[in-house]
Image (tube, rainbow, N blue to C red):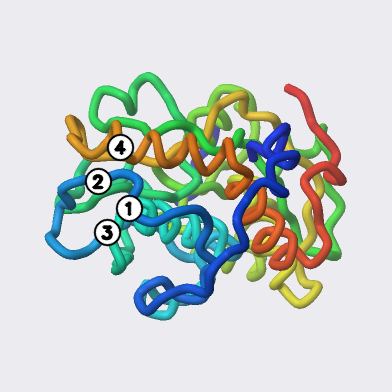
Amino acid sequence: MKFSSGFLGTALGCLMALSAPALAAEGYGDCKLYGEPGTERIETAIPGQFTVLINLPAVGEFNGDTPETVRSGREFCMAVNIAYRLGIDKVVLRNASFDSIVAGQNKDFDIALALISITEPRKKVVDFSTPYSIGSFGIATRADASLDQEGLKTTKLGTQAGTVMVQWAQEHLPDATLSVFDDTGAMFTALAAGSVDAVMTDISVVLGQVANSGGKLKVVGQIPSGADTAGVYPKGSKAKPAIDKVIADLAADGTLAALEEEYLSAERGGLKPEDVPVWNF
């Protein structure tokens, strides 16, 4: 290779069992709250707040240009509902590079949410939460470009540092020219500018970016990753059991399905993962 520089499933059936969502309190953005508060308890990394590491931009997951401006999104409102059920009324977001999150280089946080795939090497340096969706790699190009599965093998491809897609591309696309970017924003900027001909990242991110590109980009395919998506804890986190239980409860009672429907469907502009062609390698 050349280098150039949800669990919807049965949970949908549980939606009717949810209590009516409450309006978000101060510190919860615009999120709806589901279930009962304070069903579990933890000692937070920073007293008085639930600290969440994120990786912006993440349209549909964390809607905002900076941590301070995020007030909605699937993963954000998932974090809010975790905090709510832990009896914590303040959620604080901290932006970090994806590479540093999966390398276990951050401290003083309770959970990281950034569409992170569970892998064995990562388990050596971080702990993973209960999974909350299954990942797939999405492929985006400029709207006027033509790219099929065969063409992907020799294209100029961009992806993000620290993701499982870097190694996947090295192994499965040895004749492609791969550019690795530090963050999602830089990667999509490079695509729009023509520095790369296609980009590959989580299908959720791809659909959100394409929907917000003003018709300049399109999604052409997706590749099943076969990996679960989960949150990341600092290695040895004592909060893991309680937060894991809350996430499992959110999946079982339909909250996660409700959040996916509300935030991802809206931000994707009608684009759905099931409508994107599946490419198998």
Q: Secondary structure at mark 4?
A: helix
For disc 1, the marked residue is 38
Image spot of residue 94 (x, y percent): 29, 64
Within-10-Å neighbours for mark 4: few <14, some 14–19, many 20+: some
Furthest-left residue in this view? 47
Which of the marked residues, 4 or 2, is nearer the chain's N terminus? 2
Which of the marked residues, 1 or 3, is nearer the chain's N terminus? 1
For disc 4, the marked residue is 242
Image point (80%, 51%), residue name? 272
- The type of residue carrying mark 1 is Gly
For disc 3, the marked residue is 50
Q: Is residue 156 visible?
A: no
Instruction: Report the disc number at residue 41.
Output: 2
Q: Note whether 35 is above or below 48 in the view shown.
A: above
Q: Quadrant of residue 270?
A: bottom right
- The type of residue carrying mark 2 is Arg
Left or right of residue 197, residue 169 in this image? left
Image point (72%, 53%), residue name? 140
* Label 2–label 1 contact, CB within 8 A: yes
Q: Secondary structure at mark 1?
A: loop
